[in-house]
Image: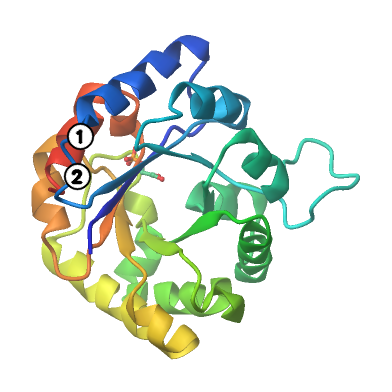
Amino acid sequence: MGKLIVGNWKMNGLGPALAEAQAVAAGLGGSLGGSGVRVGLCPPATLVERMARCLSGSSVLVGGQDCRAEASGAFTGDVSAEMLSEAGAVLVILGHSERRSGYGETDARVAAKVEAALRAGLEPIICVGETLAEREAGRAVAVVSTQVRGSLPQVLGGRPFSVAYEPVWAIGTGLTPTTAQIEEIHAAVRAEMSAVLGASGTRAPILYGGSVKPDNAAEILSVSEVGGALVGGASLKSADFLGIIAGAG
Ligand code: 13P
């Protein structure tokens, strides 16, 4: 199955940044046809509709970075899955470590958001990952396995989704796990997905995220059970993001 490469712009990007998204679409052209690579960009909520409009007709998928579990209501500042979908999103990142740590999002909360995403027809990208302290305590596999079990609701069975393994200590640091460490965690994630979801847990891609750059992408993407990448900083520049995508072909 083709890899899924998704850029997470986080809280970066005003209108002029859409030129980078257009450059990604132009750079892909028809060249991905044979390789089956799927490419997505998740801009801040304010840019989802504009990005979807300017990329319509291209192969680039647009996504949100979070959503509320409820469809509507008195939740000042929040955005629902339905709102993202109406704005043109087809993907949504859920349970990113910056939300788990900054907003106290629990596995149960993430699972509720996954259900909301499916209700709105969005394809969720469910993030998990251990902190440095957890890794150093020898608990990386246990922590990530628990997150997968708690964050993937049963209703995911048969629906398109992916899990992203993003070690917290590798995000924005330039540090990456060894390929053996990535392989170990991805195998544990796969086992847990299969235990929770049965057959459909054996198929959905497991992305790696954390300091993915053009010069390490091909090596990371060749690791067993790495089905794609979730890219932060290097997705803000079209040349870097296209370089990463090239490593997936
Ligand atoms: P960086 O690629 O900037 O390390 O960020 C990874 C990430 O958090 C993507 O969601």
The scheme the figure's colours follow is rainbow
Q: Position of residue 236 (x, y in %)?
A: 35, 26
Q: Residue furthest right?
A: 74
Assign ligand 1 to one image quadrant. Answer: top left
Residue at 58% of width from left, 49% of height from top? 99
Q: Do labels 1 and 2 touch, CB within 8 Å? A: yes
Marks 1 and 2, how far apart in space?
6 Å
85 sits to left or right of 219: right
Judging depth in this view, the residue of 156 and 139 nearest the camera is 156
- Quadrant where the N terminus sits is bottom left
In percent of width and height, residue 97 lies at 49, 53
Q: Amino acid at mark 2?
A: Gly
Query: Residue 198's x, y, as percent?
Result: 43, 89
The answer to whether the beta carbon of the residue marked 2 is less than 8 Å from any atom of ligand 1 is no
What's the residue at 57%, 55% (across, down)?
100
Seen at 41% across and 72% down, the residue is: 144
Q: Amino acid at mark 1?
A: Gly
* Residue 199: quarter of image: bottom left
Image position, residue 5 (x, y; %)? 30, 47
Residue 80 visible here: no
Q: Residue at x 13, y 64 (%)?
A: 223
Label 2 Cα crowd, 10 Å radius (few <14 / some 14-19 / many 20+) = few
Q: Is residue 85 left or right of residue 234?
A: right
- Residue wearing tag 1: 30
Q: For mark 2, give the secondary structure.
A: loop
Q: Secondary structure at mark 1?
A: loop
Pointer 1 local density, CA inside 10 Å: few below 14, some 14–19, many at least 20: few
How many numbered marks does the figure carry? 2
| 32 horizontally vs 154: left or right | left
Which residue is tagged 2?
33
Q: Splitting the image into 4 quarters, where does residue 224 fall?
A: bottom left
**What number is the disc on residue 80?**
none
